[in-house]
Image: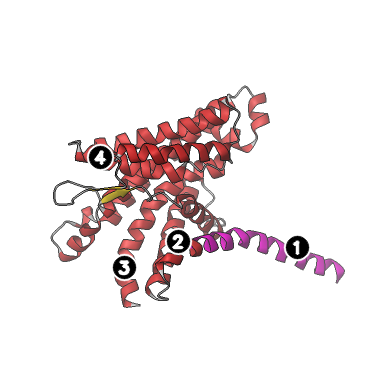
Amino acid sequence: MTSFINALPGAITQGMIWGVMAIGLYITYKLLEVSDLTVDGSFCTGGAVCVMMMLSGYNVWIAMLGAMLIGMLAGLVTGFFHTKCGIPAILSGILTQLGLWSVNLAIMGMKANQALNVNNFDLLVNLRYLQEVQKGTRPVWEHPIVVVGLFTVVIIGALYWFFGTELGSSIRATGANGNMARAQGINTNFNKVLGLSLSNGLVALSGALLSQYQGFAEINMGRGAIVIGLAAIIIGEVVFSKIFINFGLKLLAVSIGAVIYYMVVQFVVSVLAINTNYLKLFSALIVAVFLAVPYWKQEYFHQKRKEGHHA
């Protein structure tokens, strides 16, 4: 239990970083109702671009902007496959993800990983900063939880504003009822491409943050990202659906869902001492259980109503 408590700040930070990715996934999964598997590739792309740009001499802000723009480009490719080539969305994402494997290797100079030495670069977040803040050698406002928390608040605020505009509302209308949206003169194909681009831009931004936090980018860092993102969305929805009605609060629930997910994972690793090789299986089971909970609740109350009628 002591090791679990000591590891909590790191787990919360990682959860918040992945929460940014989950917010991006929320745009496609919940608003557009599109299953986008591009994220497994674009997450790594964001990390790779950020690390390589910093190694080339760019400052961290420019590197993160570059990562986000390349992520948006990946989403644009998926959107092109889906809207202009008539390929189903899920297959479009798989194709882009597959292509990004080679692209990511090329970005990293055909190496499986590239390190970013915290001593040589001015990073926004890093694992070492956790200890330095605790020791008092680094100011509290540079604590990774504070930095990523501010990032999350700014992203949620920007998305809340954007999806309240006419363009943002038309994207939501496209996901809610595409036929009705088209009948109102909305260009649904454009909205799908824009939504996919925006989503993957946020996913890549999350990858850029994680690569700084862990001090390297590697080719497998995005594998299973879709599962973690879905876990965050479903956990946030199941836990906070009755409390968080507002759109901005729903996005916050996604971020909190990612933190809960990582805290559960840390508990399993630290307290239950489960082999980390089984984490992917454990992640799949978490998502399956939280996806099933709303269905079980619905079936339970339906059964209760039937028994009430018979009585």
Residue at x-position 30% and y-position 56%: 145
Q: Is residue 165 visible?
A: no
Q: Are marks 3 and 2 in contact (CB under 8 Å)?
A: no
**Which is nearer the N-term, disc 4 or disc 2?**
4
Find out whether residue 134 is within the magenta segment: no
Q: Which residue was labeled with disc 4? A: 52
* Gap in angstroms between the C-alphas marked 4 and 1: 55 Å
Q: Mark 2 touching mark 1, by CB under 8 A? A: no
Q: Which residues are magenta?
A: 283-311
> In front here: 298 or 261?
261
Kindly identify the residue that appears in the image at 62 percent across and 38 percent down: 176
Asked whether 12 or 163 is in front, the reply is: 12
The quadrant in which the C terminus is found is: bottom right
Mark 4 neighbour density, 10 Å: few (under 14) some (14–19) many (20 or more):
many
Looking at the image, do the residues carrying marks 3 and 4 touch, with CB atoms under 8 Å apart?
Answer: no
Judged by depth in the image, the label closer to the viewer, 3 or 1, is 3
Which element is circle 1 on? Answer: helix
Q: Which mark is residue 261?
A: 2
